[in-house]
Image (spheres, rainbow, N blue to C red):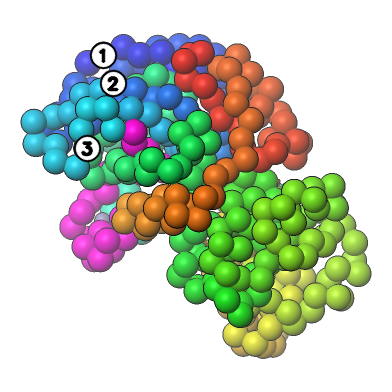
Amino acid sequence: MRTVHAYAAPSATEPLVPTTIERRDVGPKDVLIAIRYAGICHSDIHTVRGDWGPITYPQVVGHEIVGEVVEVGPAVSKHAVGDRVGVGCMVDSCRECDNCRAGMENYCLNGSTDTYAAVDRDGTITQGGYSTHVVVDEDFVLRLPDAVDYAAAAPLLCAGITTYSPLAHWKAGPGTRVAVVGMGGLGHMAVKIAAAMGAEVTVLSRTLAKKDDGLAFGAQDYYATDDDATFEALADRFDLLVNTVSAPLDVDRYLRLLRLDGTMINVGAPPEPMPVTMFTLFGNRRSFAGSTIGSIAETQEMLDFCAEHGIAPETELIAADQINDAYERVLSGDVRYRFVIDTTTL
Ligand code: NAP
Ligand code: ZN
Ligand code: ZN
C-alpha cells in the first residue's frame, strides 16, 4: 500500500478538501501511474452530490486521467515505465459475460468497475483521479499517442469517448446531419469529432453566446434553444441528435427535429425520467437511444483518431484549491469547455 495526496468530497453538501488515500500494491498485471492531469466531468459533480443516489464518503472522483507509468507488475506487457497513458471511466470488468467477450466492457452484464465510487475486486471503494497516483490493471490503461497534447488530453478519456462512441456507432459521416445539444464538456467534443468524421454539424445551445466557438470547432450552424423559432426552422432535419445536457429536456420537442429514421442519442445523465410520446416516435420512424462511454478498444481508436485529426479538448488548467469554484462554474454553465486539474498542486 502507498499513501497518496488527493482531493475528496467529505459529504454530499460540503466542499471537496485535501486528503490522503491508500493505493494498493502493484499486482502482477498492474500499472502504477503518476497522474499529471485530471479532468472535471459533470458526472463527478452528480456523483459527489448524490444526484444518482447515495455513495460512501469520503469519495475521490475524477475519471479523465492522464499521467506517466512509474512502475509495472511482472506480467505487464502493454505498458512500460515512462509511457504516457490514460485511464477513463472503468478500471475493470468481469471479462466473462457476453458483452465483455464481445469487447464491450462498458456494457459488462455484471457491471464494469467504475474508476470511482464502485466496489473493487478487493472489496474497497474505488477512488478516482483527483489524486497523485493510481494503480490500474493494464487492460484498462490506454496509450496516449505522441501527437495528442499531454496537458489537454485528459477530457478525451470521458468526454471524448462518450461522444465518439455513439457518433461512430450511428455512422456520422459525409452526408449525415448531426445536431449536438448542449455545448459543454461533452458537447464541444461531439462537435469537433462529428465535424472530423465529415458530418454536417449543428449546435443547439441555450443561447448564441458560444456561437463563434461552435463554428470554430467545426459546426456549420448554431441555434439557440431558448428561441421557439429554432424548433420550427429545424423540424424533420437531422439524422442524429446527440443530447449532452445534464438536466432533463422536453424530449418530444427534440425528437421532432429528426428526419426519417433519425436517432436521438442521450448521453446526458440527469437523474429524472424524461417522458417520450409514442406518436413522436412513430413520425419519421424515429428512435430514442442511450449510450454510455465506450469500450477500451474504442477508446484507443478514439485517441488515435484525435491524434490523426489534430483534435484536442479546450481546457482551463486549474490548481487543486480551485476545484470547488470550478464545480460552481460548471453548474452555472460557465465552462470553456473543460476544467483540468494540475495534479502537481495536490
Ligand atoms: P457540462 O460541461 O456541464 O455541459 C452540459 C451542457 O448542457 C451545458 O454546457 C449547457 O450547454 C447544457 N445545459 C446545462 N444545464 C442545462 C439546462 N438546465 N437546460 C438546457 N441545457 C443545459 O457537462 P458534461 O461534463 O458535458 O456532462 C453532460 C452530461 O453528460 C452530464 O449529465 C454527465 O453526467 C453526462 N455524462 C454521461 C456519460 C455517459 O457515458 N453517458 C459520460 C459523461 C458524462 P449550453 O450552455 O450550450 O446550453
Ligand atoms: Zn465523465
Ligand atoms: Zn462482463
Please name the residue that numbered disc 1 is placed on.
Answer: 2
Which residue is located at x 73 percent, y 69 percent?
254
Please name the residue that numbered disc 2 is placed on.
Answer: 23
Does 70 appear in magenta? no
21 lies left or right of 258: left
Q: Where does ligand 3 appear, by image quarter?
A: bottom left
Q: Which mark is residue 95?
A: none
Q: Secondary structure at mark 1?
A: strand
The relative height of residue 112 versus residue 124 in the rendered view (above or below) is below
- Indicate which disc, 2 or 3, sits on the residue closer to the N terminus: 2
- Looking at the rendered structure, the kind of residue marked 3 is His
The reply to whether callout 2 and callout 3 are in contact (CB within 8 Å) is: no
| Of 234 and 16, the residue lying toward us | 234
Please name the residue that numbered disc 3 is placed on.
Answer: 79
| Of 316 and 110, the residue lying toward us | 316
Within 10 Å of disc 1 (Cα), the crowding (few <14, some 14-19, many 20+) is few
Foreground label between 1 and 3? 3
Q: Is residue 257 visible?
A: yes
